[in-house]
Image (spheres, rainbow, N blue to C red):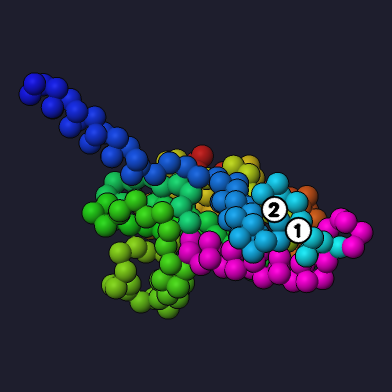
Amino acid sequence: MKTILFLMAYYFLSVNLYSQKLEYRSVDYYFDLVEKLEIDKLKEEKLIDKDLNVTKKYRKDTGKGLNDEGRKKYLDIKINVLKSVFKNYLYQQHLEYEQDIYGLYFSMAGFDDTEWCIIKWRKDKWNNQEKVDKKLVHNSEMELEEGKNVVNLDFIFICSNYDEGPKNLDGVKIFIKNNYLIMERGGLYHSLFDLKNQKVLVNETCPWCKSEAESKEKMNLWIKENLHDKIEKIINE
């Protein structure tokens, strides 16, 4: 009997611990979440029915698409959903290095701009944070830029970058090689952090802005020449 009770306790404890474990989440994970919330809200506001068809009140007289009132209502719903979801930075991945945890977080600004940041916690302060308040992250970033010691937060801002215009959303991840932390997006290295010396060596906040490129291909060529190749050389020395 004692053996059975022990096994049951072990099973439930294991399930509980497993359920709290954070695993990698792609950008699409959050886009799918936004889409689901939008659909639920559209149904709630009766813009669409249970079969996802536009309801008569908000349908054009031609029978296809939203009328003016429907478009306005849809826009309001979309804005509110985006604001609700992306008021925080959202978890994508984390790595351990010595006594620290490095977390990669994703968010959006406005309708279209996608943004990422890397944050560091001490292991004893890490609590599987699925989201982090943007205001706290920005405060940490400003204090770091001003050379102040961040004493009121459990984490330290490392770096951030965002896509305004063309986007590299696939394969977003961080990894460690030769005591360097690298952020990769779209198969290109974007950021390099020296773990031993606690210093950002390579990063560009807005690659598209800096490159002044007219297309994704030209932007990525700029990223390869000015970020990726530099990072690759350093981590392989």
Where disc 2 sits, the SS reads: loop
Comparing 138 with 146, the one in front is 138
Prevailing secondary structure class for the magenta stretch in the rendered image: helix
**Residue pointed to by mark 2:** 49
Q: Amino acid at mark 1?
A: Thr
Comparing 63 with 6, the one in front is 63
Where disc 1 sits, the SS reads: loop
Above or below 232: residue 58: below
Q: Residue at position x 41%, y 54% from top?
A: 130
**Residue pointed to by mark 1:** 55
Is the Cβ of the residue at disc 2 closer than 8 Å to that at disc 1? Answer: yes
Above or below 196: residue 205: below
Comparing 31 with 142, the one in front is 31
Considering every residue shown, the one lying at the far left of the view is: 2
Q: Report the Cα–Cα distance between label 2 and label 1.
A: 6 Å
Considering every residue shown, the one lying at the far front of the view is: 56
Is the residue marked by circle 2 packed among few (<14), some (14-19), or many (20+) residues within 10 Å? some
Q: Residue at position x 88%, y 56% from top?
A: 63
Residue stretch in magenta: 61-89
Image coordinates for residue 52, horizontal then vertical, percent: 71, 50
Q: Would you say residue 25 sits in the magenta stretch?
A: no
Considering every residue shown, the one lying at the far right of the view is: 62
